[in-house]
Image: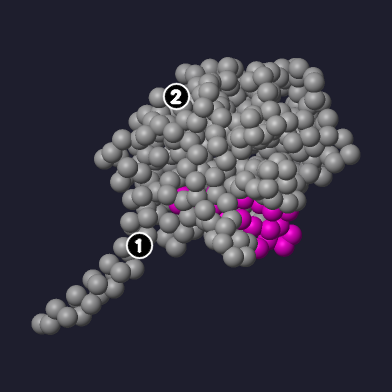
Amino acid sequence: MSTTPILAVLALVTAVLYNPITLRIQVLGISRSFGTIENIHGEDLRVIPDTLYCEDLHHHLPSGLLFGASEDNSENRWKWFPPITIFSDPTALGHGTIVVIDPKTFTTTRLTLPNFPGPFVTHGIDIYSPPDDPTSVYIFAVNHLPNPLYLSSPTSRSIPAARSRIELFHHTLGSPSATHLRSIYHPLIRTPNDIYAINSTSILVTNDHYYRSGLLRTYEEIGWQSLAPWTDLIALSLTDPYATTDNGNDTTGVTASVARKGIHNNNGLGHGRAPGEILINDASGGMLVVAQLDPFRTIGSVQLPCTLDNPTYFADPYAASTGRDASGYVLAGLALAAKFPKGDDPVMVWLVQPEGKGKVEWSQKLIFQDDGKALRSASTAVLVAIDPADNGGKKQAWLFVTGPLSFGVVVSRVDL
């Protein structure tokens, strides 16, 4: 029997799988696990108080303030947090809140939620201000609650443990509180991770996994686009944005549809260079996808060497005055994702900028890296420009980085 056909098939399989497997080894940090993670901290590294487990962060440009959602207790995350398959105690629920960070003073205001007793197990958020009222801030936030049906039958494998939903708050700049407008649920929201606010009544929500737990979920994470394109992006609208949900009816006035399907590990969302541009991260795939809404079409994509989470866009306000535009996509992720969340969870932050003729190529600059000692895990990074006139002419920005297991938002001054 000739072995030539077998060798030919093996050669073909090797040729087809070599590049994607090599890329997975790099992105998941397996190749980095044999070395050391060098700290690249910039200048004046500090931790902002009262920002525990602040997984997501958004820059409110009209005010210059940063908004996030933070937990109140460090222990509960290790008892109940569905996004990393922690379901051990569905009664250990956090009572988090919305935090507002002043990037000039590095102080935090933890907003009170007087008409929302919780629980509030925080994750991704987004904010929206009407163009004609920039002092008014609508805040959409993921809340990972246990499924009441699961609580009554905790041994049933057919009942999902979590029934996550979205909370909608309203905040007026300068106020110490936020008003809870309503809770939002739809069966299409299964494993929500992040939110893209179109306006005060329309959002997009990512389901970051198809499988909530188990081996097939692991397969999703170690696979890639052609092997596990199972997650989707949900378009959600409120026909009654102020419906009373005190009676537990969080489905009133909620309509939803699948805006995009066939995505691998659809995770973090961000606003791009202009209205209607959406940033989507394939988290475990390390891929940034830049797309346009209405109609949805992909503009481009960028492959990074580590996992990614919530993308942000930095618009350089001093491009004209300095003669150099440092605008770009800011991407935070894990350097050793294969060990998450059982290691030190070191982090990387990249600034991705268009370059070349026609700006069709992408430069990738590593602007921050930590071995997990100053910052454990990174899911979001935001750049806030420093005026060169107040900074000795230097082209720099304050970099704010945070993650789902970080004990506080870390900030440092970095060169652009």
Mark 2 sits on what residue? 374
Q: Using the image, tell me which numbered label, if any, was put on residue 161.
A: none
SS state under label 1: helix
Is residue 309 left or right of 120 when viewed as pictured? left
Q: Residue furthest bottom?
A: 2
| Between 158 and 77, the one nearer to me in the picture | 77
Which circle's residue, 1 or 2, is located before the other in the chain?
1
The N terminus sits in image quarter: bottom left
Mark 1 sits on what residue? 19
Q: CA distance from mark 1 to mark 2?
A: 34 Å
| Between 120 and 135, the one nearer to me in the picture | 135
Residue at (29%, 73%) from the top-left corner? 12
Q: Is residue 291 magenta?
A: yes
Amino acid at the residue labelled 2: Ala
Residue at (68%, 58%) from the top-left corner? 292
Count the marks: 2
Where does the magenta region start and end?
A: 276-298
Amino acid at the residue labelled 1: Asn
SS state under label 2: loop
x then y, percent, for residue 72: 57, 18
